[in-house]
Image (spheres, rainbow, N blue to C red):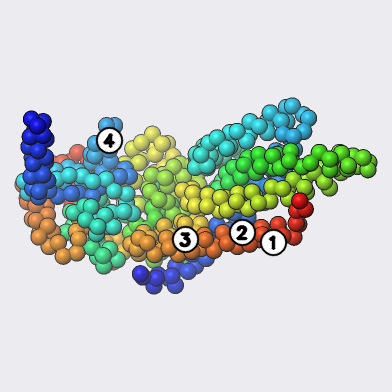
Amino acid sequence: MDFSWIFEYQGLLVRGAFLTCLLLAISVTLGFALAIFLAIAQVGNGSIARWISKGYCTFFRGTPLLIQLWLIYYGLGSYLPHIPGLRTSFLWPVMREGLFFAALALTLNFAAYQGEILRGAMLAVPKGELEAARAVGMSARMILRRIWLPRAIRIGLPTFAGEVILQLKATPIVFSVTVMDLYGAAYKIRQDTLLVYEPLLLVTVFYVGLTFVITQVFQKLENAVPVRR
Amino acid sequence: MKHLGKVLALAAVILTTNAHAEIRFGIVNEAYPPYTTKDASGKAIGWEIDLMDAVCAELKEKCTIVDVAWDGLIPALESKKIDVIWSSMSITDERKKRIDFTDKYYSALAGMIGTKDGTMGVTAEQLKGKTIGIAVSTTQSAYFKKHFAQVATEKSYATVDESFQDLASGRIDYVFADTAPLKEFLKTDIGQGCCEFKGNVEPDNAILGAGVGGGIRKGDDALREKLNAAVQAVRANGKYAEFSKKYFDYDPY
């Protein structure tokens, strides 16, 4: 076991760990926000919105994440430079980076899974509670905001924890579009130092540690809002 | 029972052929034209394959090709899955800590290609503020760290091929790699459309290495001497120049 490389590469590793966490945070936050709209569209009355949402979820759950990432990065990404003015605009420094496309693909993918889970959770909220809310004179919007969504989120909470952990473990594929996340850093160290196992062991410890933190956070959340049975 | 006899005879044949010394050449399975690549049927072709064939003919040995990913070459050599790395690996001090090398069998120049914008040259001054695509952990990556890291940004790719894609779509300004594969890319339709050769970088032998050689397990001196002698013989009898002509308009040695 040789870990003498850690000091030489600590900058790369710290930056990589930061990028991994950043991608996880962006995709989970934005993906969850998008999932709320997807779920509402599916349980709501509008048939067009329902079909759009269903189609979206089926597409993104039905194709491998790697292919989505490459379609977006190599496909969409290679057409962007042809849009007049974009290459000289202030957006270009962000939009030429792999990080932008990686965050986009991870977010869209996460939203599809989360949307389906949230839809199920919304249907699992007892009808009586929604009827009680109507009986005290709440508007549909207020019921959604105060009763339906909060109850659904609480019901889905244990599943969300699992989804966030899965999302964490999906992030290493972003290295394939030049994002130097933690796995990318480990890959580079393996190549430079010709060590096979040690860099992998280090990132394994990091991923397990982060998973532990995620489960603890969700445990706290679940305890904070106990379910009465 | 009759069949069993046949099977045993066949097994004996297979065993004896296996026992006969054969040299397993580890060749990278990512395309690296003109040195190694695969034709439509999946057969390995390229300059290094021609050299291997010539060397094996010289040695009168049976040689087999083993496909290995670039980052798996040295581990495969050490775990005896292959006997020699024959895959455009530059002879560098860092690698010499783990493996031995034969004498060089070709010299690689390091150069850059970029989008067609009329500027030429690849000095630190000209690369200021540019983004340069480099395959991860190559001699070019080490060169970049020493000479250009102050002024330009490095973007790491798993293979050179992927960096070409990003150069064509304008995500990076230059690709820094061995000159021969760069020129090979410029011959393709995409390469012709987008990009041009910008020049070779100033030599720095400490980093760019003393040419490309075959990687040998530490202490496998017998094989190293055999291969060195065979490469010299192939150069002396004119075969080296003969197949090099198919790929280069200069002597790659």
Mark 1 and mark 3: span between their CA atoms?
A: 24 Å
Q: Earlier in the sequence, mark 1 or mark 2?
A: 2
Residue B181: x and y in percent read: 31, 45
Q: Nearer the viewer, residue B73 or B12?
A: B12
* Label annotation for residue A215: 2
* Label annotation for residue B42: 4
Q: Chain of mark 2?
A: A
Mark 2 and mark 4: span between their CA atoms?
A: 47 Å
- On whether disc 1 and disc 2 are found on a single subunit, the reply is yes
Q: Quadrant of residue B243?
A: top left
Q: Amino acid at mark 2?
A: Thr
Q: Chain of mark 1?
A: A
Residue B26: x and y in percent read: 23, 50
> What residue is pinned by disc 3?
A204
Q: Chain of mark 3?
A: A
Q: Amino acid at mark 3?
A: Thr
Q: Earlier in the sequence, mark 3 or mark 2?
A: 3
Q: Residue at x 36, y 70 (%)?
A: A2
* Label annotation for residue A220: 1
- On whether disc 1 and disc 4 are found on a single subunit, the reply is no
Q: Amino acid at mark 1?
A: Lys
- On whether disc 2 and disc 4 are found on a single subunit, the reply is no
